[in-house]
Amino acid sequence: MADRCAPIDHFIAVSHWYAGHIAPRLGLSPTRVSVVYPGIDVTSRRVSPPPSVPTIGYFSRLSEKLGLNLLVEAFLALRGQPGLEDLRLVIAGGMTGDDEANMVHVRARLAEAEKAGAATITEAFAPELVAEVMSRVTVLSVPIPEGEAFGLFAAEAMSYGVPVVLPTSGAFPEILALTGGGLSCEPGSVSSLAEALARILRDPALRSRLSQAGRTGIETHFDLHANMTPALVACYTSATP
């Protein structure tokens, strides 16, 4: 990749974390990289009241590498605790590679713990599912241990007023700092993840504050029309000979 970068005038990264992560590997000077955050069409998102039953959501590729199994274990640790006796889990997303085998394991783990009936699993990923999933969850988490270059699922959730719990890795701290729409947890830690989820699930006032902050943060920093489009135009213009 580094060998093919020479004739390219300019590069766009989706977060400052990723720009700092990838530019040195490709031998790029900071002046050749701009950061443009992915945008959300905020006007098409509607904030719904949280479900009457506390529900944890996951919406991404159904992969162990993306933290799905960690989230299932956190759910099992919380289900049945005071105030969370009826806790539910909503999982949705597509599969590739060895994900199908992992989902067999996930379903078996839920059955083994006698909690299969408390989980709804949709093995599909489609844009029309986003609004449905977000309307059914109290909090969303895709706890990727190694982090992500951005994490569009987090921005999507916050645009619907759904708080998130994300590990302190990759670009997640950057996104949470800009929005204030969620809580952090230690990467790869089931107990830390469960603790952060429980704080939101048990505290309606905290959940409401995070919901409002997240939505406002998306409107302020990640709006498709107000932020992303003009930033891209500025990048294209500056790169024009």
Image (cartoon, rainbow, N blue to C red):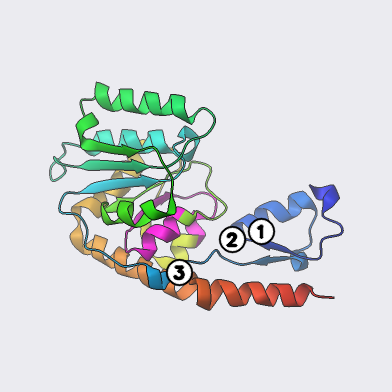
Circle 1 residue: 19
Front: mark 1 or 3:
3
| Towards the viewer: 16 or 107 | 107
- Residue 29 on image: x %, y %: 79, 62
Q: Earlier in the sequence, mark 2 or mark 3?
A: 2
Residue at x 37%, y 62% (from the top left corner): 158
Q: CA distance from mark 1 to mark 2?
A: 6 Å
Residue at x 85%, y 48% (from the top left corner): 3
Magenta range: 153-174
- Height in image: 169 above or below 155? above
Q: Secondary structure at mark 2?
A: loop
Q: Earlier in the sequence, mark 1 or mark 3?
A: 1
- Height in image: 225 above or below 50? below
Circle 2 residue: 15
Circle 3 residue: 41
| Towards the viewer: 22 or 37 | 37
Residue at x 54%, y 56% (from the top left corner): 150
Type of amino acid at the residue the image marks with label 2: Ser
